Amino acid sequence: MTVTTPTAARPAPAQAPRRKRFSWTPYFFIGLAVLYLLLFAVIPLLKGLDLSFTNTRLLNPTAGRYIGVDNYEHLLGGGAFFKSVVTTLVYTAFTVVLSLTLGTVSAFVINRYFPGRTLARAVIVMPWAVPTVAVALVFRWIYNDSTGIANNASSALGLGERGWLTDPAYGMPSVVIATVWKVTPFVMLVVLAALQSVPEDLYEATRIDGADSYSTFKLVVLPFLLPTLRVVALLMTIWSFRRFEIIWLLTGGGPVDATNTIVIDVYREAFNNSQLGLAAAAGMLGLVLSLVVTAIYFVVEQRANKQNGMNE
Amino acid sequence: MAVALSLALSGCSGGGGGGTAETGPAAAEGGTLTFANWQWLEKGRGDNILAAVKEYEKVNTKAKIEKQEITRADYEKTISTQIGSGAGPDILIIPDPFFPELASSGALEPLDGLLDADSEKALRKTNENYKFDGQQLGLIWEAVPYALFYNNDIMSAAGVKPPTSADELATVAKTIKDKTGKTGFVVRHQLNEEAPWFTDYSNWVYGFGGKWSDGKKLTLNSDENIAAADAFLKAYKSGGFGVGDDASTYRSKFSAGEVGMVIDNSSALLTMVSSPNGVKSTQVSASPLPFPEGGSAYAGFSIGINANSKNKELAKDFIKWMMTADAQSKFVDALFPSGIATGVSAPDAKIKANPWIDSFYKQLENSSSVVIPGFETKTPQVRTIVLTQVARMLTTGISAKEAMDAAQQQASSLAP
């Protein structure tokens, strides 16, 4: 009788680690993006920065000389540029707050079912689809002192006529109204998409728990909406800093500089006064303003993420 | 940013100012000339001007002229950008306030000696304005005069006569508005039309005996300039003024019989009375500007050659031909009702059909350029400062004196 002693299970011989095959594919795709950014963002930005330290003129862009920080001194030493900064901030604040408020409210309304909802959505979105130049031209007619319906309406209401585009007191409100009319549908669409991403079973759970509408909004809907609202607010802010055509076509920066934002300043310096260097310096200061806003956004976003425990 | 991008992509190879581009083949070899002008877009008149220009193709059969259309509002900006990037048209029409900017940048080909002595003598005196640092960089294309013109039917309906003073202008404007419901009087008055408004507004300053400078220092707040600003304010506040109407709007309204009186140039009026369903030329009359000293501004334009042009010889040959008596007889018809380069009289038939032209021609005899002597290249900056203050005066209740004092103070840093 032969006794066989059981053999302990031998571990499998360790395999040599498999070498990853090198691939150019990801570098190709990243390279395309980097090339695009280099060509259309980084190089123009650096060129703009370079221009801002010169006295380059539009008609003779190769004859500019370096003049140090003279352009920046000129801008920061006079009151006109600071007035443009304030005008830009006022325009941005009103535009962002009003469009966010109206867009969010519209999204809530349009999110509920009611007869004709599809038609209502199409109508509300329409201003976003209309070219900005057309919007400006239509509002010029609306605001016309002698034949515009804005004055017809204000007269009918017993408020008298106003110089919507000719009186410095009304220039900014007129431009803000036209802008808000144009951009609110974008906010509405984004917020509506966020609203529709709230799972239905969450609503059901709150209903079962007996939560009222306010509690449902505060505890369920708002947490879903906040990240979207923050991104939209950032986009709207940066776009408002940069917005040119609607202001230029409605008022040209007037009446009496009431709507003279930084972008209008840049355009005037470059194309009215042929001062490319000075225009580039104004553009750089505007860029700094945008970067400050973006930095604030990231700080707020990071805090929110920490609170939600996303960084743990 | 867009500017920077265009410069970056063009490799910063701007040729503006260098004037280094080759002269191009001899004129006899022909070629294609691009000719930039906003007037191509003027209904009727633009076609006539182009037809006159195209006559050159009959003289030089190997040459071809292509128009480059740019709207008046965007003209200077577009040309500046094109020339700055080393390109641009071969030939261009240059509004007077734009001339110093082009000339000082070296963007124009010198034209000295292009015309013989007799041909040069035949040109209007204003041709002297197109010399820069002793070089002839442009030649006169046209001088467009201003006057006060009005719709006869509206004046009759309101029971008013043409005003002969600034006070009367305000009173008549108000009466027209009260009695007919139509706009009594209108002229440019908004900053989004800054360049043409400055020419329009200069009529008031020159009409009151004012000047923008004495050649060495700016005189924005002289007594005459303040009186002119005050008169403008009175007209604006008259209750009959077309507040908020830009030029295209009030010109359309005048054409439709909705405006009583306008101060504008003769070319604009011709366009207004050329509409088939609008006010007819015979329904319009004109009178000298209702200002005490009789002076006025004219909208002056010169013709020049882009220093970047590859066809300089052909372009020079075209301008040489343009100044011949034969060509001028065609241009006087096409450019009617402007005063053209050589002062040739317009055809009798046209003068008879447009009886209002006499007042414009009379006003032209006592008119001046709006380029500021001693501050030629600073004219755009002075313009912005002055008109911003005028706009403040019109809309915020400050006085004419306060506005002009503020303008003088703001412009004090501008060196001649």
Image (cartoon, rainbow, N blue to C red):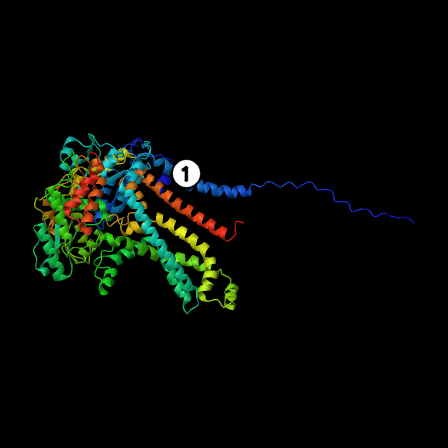
Give residue B314's position: percent from left, percent from top.
27, 35
Q: Nearer the viewer, residue B345 or A303?
A: A303
Q: Which residue is mark 1?
A: A43
Chain letter of the residue beneath label 1 in the structure image: A
Asked if residue A128 is positioned above or below residue B193 in the image, the reply reads: below
**Visible residue check, residue B404:** yes
Q: Position of residue B12 (x, y in %)?
A: 36, 35
Residue at the extreme bottom? A115
Count of numbered circles on the image: 1
Tell me where residue B410 sits by quadrant: top left
Q: Secondary structure at mark 1?
A: helix
Which kind of residue does numbered mark 1 sit on?
Answer: Ile
Where is residue B199 shown, x and y percent of the image?
Answer: 18, 44
Q: Nearer the viewer, residue B386 or B242?
A: B386
Residue A24 position (above or below residue A112): above
Please rate how many residues cluster around mark 1, counting C-alpha atoms within 10 Å: few if below 14, some from 14 to 19, many from 20. some
Splitting the image into 4 quarters, where does residue A67 fall? top left
Q: Is residue B88 visible?
A: no
Q: Nearer the viewer, residue B245 or B116?
A: B245
The residue positioned 49% from the left and 52% from the top of the image is: A307
| Residue extending farthest right | A1
Report the side of B133 relative to A237 (left or right).
Answer: left
